[in-house]
Image (cartoon, rainbow, N blue to C red):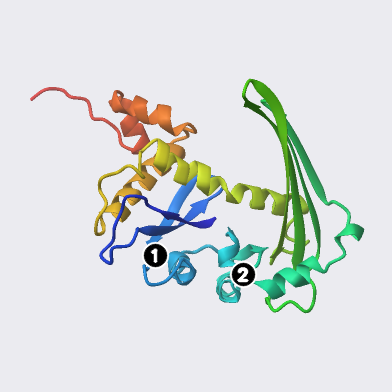
Amino acid sequence: AVDGKALKSTIDADGKIVHLLSAFDHQVGVTFAQRQVDTKSNEIPGFRPLIEGLDLRGWVATMDALHTQRGHVTFCHDNGIDVIMIAKDNQPNLFNSLDAINWRNIPVSHRVEERGHGRHEIRTIQITDAPPDLRFEHMSQAFLVERYTSRPVRKNGKTTRVEAAVAVLGVTTLTPTNSTPEHVATYIRNHWGIENKSHYVRDVTYSEDASRVGRADKPRVMATLRNIAISLIRLAGYTTIAPTTRALRYSPDQLTAVLGLRLQPNNGP
């Protein structure tokens, strides 16, 4: 997953808020690349240098609609990386081509229904061959993801249910040969893991947005250290960051295990 995060309460050399672009492994929950966005630009030019030089052949890159760019597709294709891209207003030709597909005649390829804590969610995906007139090269399939949610909301002593429906159009270089509709749906859903497994943890557990280290390169350096801490904890097999972080303060043995070190016995002078 490639996604950006603005660091609140920070100021770079140009007096702008520091913005970082990260690459995050869905499965393991590890941030393996990070780059500061040029304040005179945006995230788009930072995509290629973020992952350039990394051997990601056979990987799948997911991203939000901002990064639905033809140059990104070409770069990823040339480096053996498949992509899943979302179509929105920033690419009107792509969106209109996908919206013109007769989705009513395309069956649902995969459906997931979940219930818990009063919340009810249904997610479906329809998938078909990409239209031949797309201006995006290398795209194999087009998809429509629909999500329906119903959840209880309590206000003024009364509980009501709030319902919402969201539809998302997109394309992917993944083919029916090397993927299934379930794979594509899972990649799309897991993309937002970078928000709750990385950005949220840095904000809530490590108080990143409240940090007083806010100038020059220091915010980027501190964000890197937070990423390393979270990644080491996950690679050591722990899934809950906050309680594990608290435990590490008082457990040298657990801390050295997370760091991959081994304490030497103290046999005296």
Q: Count all numbered tags in the image, as a single digit.
A: 2
Q: Is residue 88 left or right of residue 54?
A: right
* Callout 1 amino acid: Val
Element under disc 1:
loop
Q: Is residue 192 left or right of residue 127?
A: left
Q: Residue at x 60, y 68 (%)?
A: 68
Along the polypeptide, which appears first: circle 2 or circle 1?
1
Give the answer, above or below, for where 10 lies relative to 203.
below
Q: Give the residue at mark 2.
A: 90
Q: Position of residue 70 (x, y in %)?
A: 60, 75
Q: Give the residue at mark 1.
A: 37
Element under disc 2:
loop
Give the answer, above or below, for where 206 lies relative to 124.
above
Q: Is residue 108 left or right of residue 15?
A: right
Q: Decide if residue 118 is in sight here.
A: no
Q: Position of residue 168 (x, y in %)?
A: 71, 56
* Callout 2 amino acid: Asn
Q: Residue at x 41, y 27 (%)?
A: 243
Task: Give the quarter of the image for residue 235.
Answer: top left
- Alpha carbon separation for disc pair 2 and 1: 20 Å
Q: Residue furthest left?
A: 269
Task: Give the quarter of the image for residue 259.
Answer: top left
Give the answer, above or below, for where 32 lies relative to 101.
above
Q: Residue at x 61, y 47 (%)?
A: 190
Q: Residue furthest front?
A: 156
Q: Decide if residue 116 is in sight here.
A: yes
Give the answer, above or below, for where 161 lies relative to 33.
above
Q: Position of residue 236 (x, y in %)?
A: 43, 36
Q: Determine which of the numbered discs, if any, sits on residue 94 in the image.
A: none
Mark 2 residue crowding within 10 angstroms, few (<14) / some (14–19) / many (20+): few
Q: Residue furthest right?
A: 105
